[in-house]
Every structure is written in structure tokens, then in C-alpha cells.
Amino acid sequence: MQMDNFRNERDQYFKEIDNLNHPNETLVKTHCSYCAMQCGMNLRVNTKTNKIVGVEPRYDWPVTLGKMCPKGVTAYQQVNNKDRLLRPLIRDDQSLKGTKNGFREASWDEAYDLIVKKFTELQENYGKDSLSVYSGVSMTNEKCYLTGKFARVGLQTRYIDYNGRFCMASAAGGLNRSLGIDRGSTIPWTDVQDTDCIFLAGSNTAECHPTMMFRVWAIQERGGYVIVADPRETPVARRADLHLDLRPGTDLALANGIVNLLIENGHIDEEFIKNHTNGFEDTKELVKQFTPEYTSAITGVAPEKIIRAAEIYGKAPNAIVMFARGIEQQIKGVDNVSGYTNMALVTGKIGRAKSGVATITGQGNGQGGREHGQKADALPGYRKIANPDHVKYVSKVWGIEPEEMPKEGVSAFEMFGLMEQKTIRALYLLCSNPAVSAPDQNYVREQLKNLDFMVCVDFYLSESAEFADVVLPTTTWAEDAGTTTNVEGRIIKINQAQMPVGESKPDWKIQVELTERMGRGKYFSHLKTSEDIFNELRVASKGGTADYYGVTWEKIDKQDGVFWPCKDENDPGTPRLFLDKKFNHPDGRAKIFALPYRPSAEEPDEEYPLRLTTGRVVYHYLSGNQTRRIQFLRDMCPEPFVEVHPETAAKYNIDHEELVRLYTRRGETTYKVKITEAIRKDTVFVPYHWGHEKSINLLTIGALDPISRMPEFKACAAQIEKLKIKKVQ
Amino acid sequence: MKKRLYLELENCIGCRSCLAACTQCGGHEERNRNYVYDVNPLVNRQTMPLMCLHCVNPACARSCPAQAIQIHETGAVLSALVEKCIGCQNCTIACPYGIPKFDTEQNLMYKCDLCIDRSKDGIPPMCASVCPTNTLQWLTDEEIEAKQKQFNLDNGKWVTSMPYLEGETNVKVNLPGILQGVTKLF
């Protein structure tokens, strides 16, 4: 391919549209801070105050064309928000942990000195691994990469992991296993509208990734099909040609049932299977028992709907299978991913335009953030810490001896177990809010409280910061530059629009300054800018599966992003994977997996007869730490609720908007009831964006997928109780 | 080239991005001027936007005793002129769609002006710019005509442009609906 004039594809929706320029303002091109759609936007900056004052659509961004969801439209209101932390906070009275109280403002020097003193003391007394780093992927590749190095080279601890364990870990596990590579999508998003069938499993697309909806609807306008598998009739399921309303936690049976029918109906691609895959015969044998009736008995989906779904997907000349957290946040999340990927592999609907497999990545940099070594078992470029050659390569880039590289750590949720055992005694938390987002909150909050020392880096005083001894103020996404890797695997550029608010500093700068004070500066002091870090990341990822070596900030701007892998300066990147039908396993073949069905960790019983599932609303993002502080979003959805089917509500004698007690074996809370026919009768749903006593994660279960170590947020057993009304005397 | 706001109601997912964007156009005092309704909230998630249709002969302007509601040369029915509006609320009663809103503190009416500072230069209004689903689009007359030809419509007109609602409107609404008569590919 010719590099000189290469630009990633623009599709039929692309139009040249001028922007409105307000007087005394300039526009800074960037992307949204929230989900992995990473919608293009312009930030309006006042040229006199140099402050961000608003948003203007970015019509020339080829993926989203100026479109934004309500979170995106109001995202800029995070930056100069009244809740911003302006200076470091220290809390001297440990008895106040778990509350907002007792913090005093301090200088950076005092905060750094305290952290260094505590970290050094703990490591001297209890070993290097008594420290831990818990990170997130709502930040740039530069920061995610440096955080991995910060933990392993700066703090010299093995315990680093990140919130992707609650987000993308199952997709990563499944795609790696099936295809040998974990790039969330095999195709660019500009292919979506031109496919003939989209199969969306466990994705509330309209609320979680709204700006891809115009492409989904366009499939139907062309006469194509939209199939949705979801326990709830979400806005996308409502207009779908087929809604497979399955019980939460039964995806694997549905996937097996459909694969069985694809085989029976002769809709498989035998040539493709023979030449490019392994494992078909075993799978064929296993799925035989998943007849429509058997599958229906497990999933609760009517047999004729399963038959119809298989028929449509099988007949479609081009089809895309997409999935999201609904199938991934289960104890068999990895199997679900491989199970649905089997649909594409047996039919050969992968490795070409308009056909493929994608996980719809949640967090803004959920893709890039999992590739460059802040995962317990990973090093930059999707290298593995268990592989001595990989360790050797990265050690050289980092300037350490391979023996100095800490060993593999444990997953995010398992870190709380090590805190309980006092193996981990201190925590450096950044870009995450586990005091809302982790399952089994009563347990998690107890562990945070019992830490000897905790640092939280955030730009607001999050629920998790309430457990910290030191809170360091960091910047929002608009006060720093860097790259993220979006839902497609396209590396894009975030631009700085404003100077940091107050005394806040970008995460990477904090880490460089801390390591300098811990005597590890020689590995970090050369990193003066975010771009310096990117250039080191390029080298560190070189030759790895997620190879960024050929990506430069300049190339990103020039060609509207770069799809990895991008191996050298002349490589324009790889928008579509597997066009040569070569998969990334050593033998070049994809793997079709025979996956026996197993139930959820906690199935309903007499005592807890309902299935509780959790998810999002369109107005809030993750733990809500950002979106709950924005007026418009708070007005639209101020508090959580529990969705109940009217027949179920009648059984419990509860009314719309009545307050009820919802409880599981792990916890309880009260919510207002929202009656809707758009949910299964055996299922209740609560959105998870709230903390303290309103957190649904007080009730969820910490059962983990054996491979991805992802908790089963999407299914546990629950019960509702009508609150007794006290009689007024 | 003249462009119009064009609506495809079935695309709406109820994200209310249009309302968020309405507060951000710079000339709207951060108050949104349109509506998104839950059609049948206890049953399903169907929603629909209710936008000012910018009638060719608008009832709001006709009913205004102070001539405060002006019609821009583009056809946009503007928000009441602050210096002329007497706060009588005739317009809120006259509009068959219930579009004009009333600020009781300032005793002033306010309504959608199609982001006139944008649309007068052909830049799409904020709502149609951000709409994630293409429920709200900003199209040329030719593009709208091409859309219209896909359907077999009574009198060749969409429902909102039929007499007795308000007659001809500048905003076009695809009713009875975009999926009517779509032939499946297979």
C-alpha cells in the first residue's frame, strides 16, 4: 500500500461541513473522554481566558461524523467543574477512612514525602510486593503504558492490575483463544452499515454505544437484519427483527444452539473450516445436543426464535457478530466469547469486509489500555510476563536486568483477597473507582479500610478516595495530550485544550516525580512529555502482537488514526484483520471451541428466586464519578431504580415508583421500582452507576471466570421484599 | 444550498442527546427548547422527539399580539424577541404541538430557532449534528425528495404536512415511517 497519501476510509455518510466559530474562541480537535466509540469532538476554548467553554461537533471524524451522546455533549463540563480537586489532600486520622471527612490540603512535596516514607517503610518491613497498583483504562496509552512500568520498575512490585477485569478481560481471553489475537474488532466501524445481518449479544448498544446506532439502523433500512440477544427489550432490541430474550447467564447455550443449527442447515463453509480452522469436529459433536428445544429449556428463548436466528445469520451473505459486557461479565465469559465467535468461524464470515467479529469495547481506552502492560500477566505490545523472551525484550527497553522483572501478579478482584491476607498492605489507585465498580461491595470496602496505606489519584473525591490516606489531584482528559485505541483498534489522538486546573498534574508526571523521589529516577526522568512516553511505548511494543512501532502522533493526525498492527514507518496500519485468512495462532488457523454449558455461579432458588442483572443507562458512565457531577445528566437520571416486569410486580404486590428492599446473600439496599414489560418476568435489572448505600454492587457476586478472572456482574440470585409501611399513630 | 431539518421518528432511542446539544449552541442560554417523550413507559422503551416543525404559516406567530415571533428568511420561526414579548403565553396555547416554552421568572416565551446562527449559514443545528441515530437529519430538498420517493404516501405528502395539523411545515417528518415497505434482502 502507498503510504504517502493513505487515509483511512470515509464512507457514504461523510460530508464536508463547516464548523461554527464563535468570536474570541478557538476549536481544539479531540475525542470524547468516555466510552470506546471515542467520538470525535471539538472543544471550544476561550482565547482570552484559555478555558474550555463548550463543545462543537467534529463533522470530519469518519467514525462518528459529529455525533455525540448526551454524555459526550456535556463531557467538557468535567474540566472546570466545582468538584475538581485542586491540591493534594492528606488525612492524618485513619479512623475516618471510608468517609469524606478529615482531609486537609497539602503541598505536593508533603504528599510525595509521605507516600515515599510509607511505601519505603512497608517495603522494608514486608517486602517489595506489599505495594499494589490498581489502575484503569479511561486514560491514554501513554499513561497506561507508564503505569505498568511504574509498578514494575518504579515500585518494583508484582501486584498491578486494572479495571479492565470488570470490562474487557473476557473478550480478550476469548478472542486470543479463538483467533490468536485480541484486537476488539476485525473490521472498521465504517463497515457496519453495509453488512446484511448484525447479531448483537449482550450489548445494550443504544444506551452504551449510541453513536454506532445510525449504522445499525441503516442495515434494516437496506433490508438487512438486526438480531439482539438480551434479557431486556432495550431500545435496540425493540426495533430488532428478532429479539432473543434469554435468561441472564445462558449465552453459551444459545451460541451452541445456533452453531448446531448452522451445521444442520448446511450454512457452514466447509472449505474455510478445512483450510483455516481447528476443532470443528469436536464442536460439531458437542453442539448436537443443543437442539432448539434443549437450548430453549436452558435459555428460556422460544425454539422458533432460535431457529429463525440461525436461519437469518446462516443465509446472510455478510454478517457481523458483536458482543459486549452482557455475555462477558459471567463466570463463563471467555467461553461465551468463543461460543459466539464460533458462529463466524463455522460459516467463514470473518476475514473480509462487512463480515467479522467484534466486542464493543466499554472504556475509552479499553483496547489500548489492556495491550501495554498494566495487566497482571502482560507486558507492552501484548507480551506475556510468563514468557522469558518477552521479559528479556522489555527489560532491555526499560534498562533493567530480566531477573529484576517482577513475576505475574493477580487480577483486580483477587487483589482484595490479598489485602485481606495482608499480603498487599498498600494501594496506589488511579483512574478507577472500585468502591462503586467492584462486586460484593461490603467485602471490598472492608479490604480498602484495612489497608495500611492508600493513595488515590483522581480529579474528584470519588467514593474510593474516601478510603485513601493521600489523594493526589490529576487532570481530566482535556488537560493533557496522548493517544487512545478505540473500539475498532484504531489509535487516535487526544489533544490538550486547557492547562491543568489548580495544582493538578497528569498521571504520568506524578509517576515520574514519585519514582525520582524513590531513587528510581534513572528509569523515568528522560520522559519529559507524553510524546516521549509514546515513543518509548512504540519501541516496547515492537515485535509484539499489538505492534505500535510504526505509529507516530503525526501519522495519526494525517490518516485519521492508525489501526494496529502497524510495524514500521511505511506501514499504514491494518483496518481489516485476517484478509489473507491467516489467524494469529502459530499454525495460522483459528480455533473452533467445543464448549460444554455450565450454569451461573449462583442460580435462583426458593429463597432467592429472581435473577439480578446489572448494566448502564445512557446518561451515566461506569461508576458515575464523572457523570453524576454534570447537571444535565443528573437531571435526566438522578438515581438508580429496579426494573420489574408487571406480572412479577403483581406477585410481590408492588407498584411503580414504590420503594422496595432488594437483597442477595451478600447485601441489600432499597430502590424505587420501575415497572416495565421490557424485561423478563424472572429477572430484575438495576443500573450500577451509584455508590454508598445505593450501589447495586453491594448485592453482586465476586465469582470469577477461571480464565479472564472477570466477576459475574450479569447474573446472581436475588429477592425483593415489599417494605412494611408503618402506621401513623 | 438550502437544507432542512428532517425527522425519522423510528430511529429514536431516547438518549436525549438532542436536548443536551440544544443547551450548547451558544445562543440558547443553556436551556433546551424541544422535547423527547416516552411513548408508553410502562410497556416499552419507545421514545420520540417533538421538535418545532417551523410551520410555513405558524400559529404561534399568528397568535402573538405583539409581533414578537419573527420568521427568518430561511423559514425558521424564531424565538420571541425579548424586547417585544409581553409574556401573554398565547403562543404556547396556539401551537398545535405545544412547542413554545415559557420562562415564568423572566416572563418570556422561548422556543427553537433552529440554531439560527448556525443554520443561516447552512451549518446543521446542534440537535441534528449530534443525533446518534439519524432521527434528526439536516438534508437538502433533493435528499428529502429522494427519501420521499421510497414511500407510497397519501397525496404524496407525509402526515405532518397534511392539512388540519398545521399545513405545510419547513421541517419534514417521515411519517408513516421509514421501515414501511422495505423489502428484505433475503
Image (spheres, coloured by chain):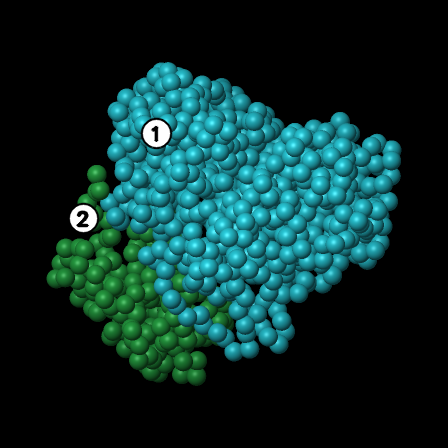
Q: Residue at x 57, y 57 (%)?
A: A553
Q: Position of residue A15 (x, y in %)?
A: 36, 63
Q: Amino acid at mark 1?
A: Phe
Q: Position of residue A12 (x, y in %)?
A: 32, 57
Q: Amino acid at mark 2?
A: Gly
Query: Can residue B68 be seen in the rendering of this structure?
Result: yes
Q: Residue at x 74, y 61 (%)?
A: A503
Pointer 1 residue = A272
Q: Residue at x 55, y 42 (%)?
A: A546
Q: Position of residue B163 (x, y in %)?
A: 17, 66
Which chain does the numbered disc 2 sit on? B
| Above/below status of B162 relative to A372 | below
Query: Can residue A336 be seen in the rendering of this structure?
Result: no
| Above/below status of B11 relative to A172 | below
Label 1 neighbour load within 10 Å: few <14, some 14-19, many 20+? some
Rendered image quadrant of residue B42: top left
- Tell me whether the residue at label 1 lies in contact with that at label 2, contact meaning CB atoms closer than 8 angstroms: no
Answer with left or right where residue A504 lies relative to residue A440: right
Tint applied to chain A in the drawing: cyan
Q: Quadrant of the C terminus of chain A?
A: top right
Q: Nearer the viewer, mark 1 or mark 2?
A: 1
**Chain identifier matching the green colour in the rendered picture:** B
Pointer 2 residue = B181
Answer with left or right where residue A106 lies relative to residue A162: right
| Above/below status of A112 relative to A148 | below
Rendered image quadrant of residue A379: top right
Q: Are marks 1 and 2 on the same chain?
A: no
Helix, strand or loop for disc 2: loop
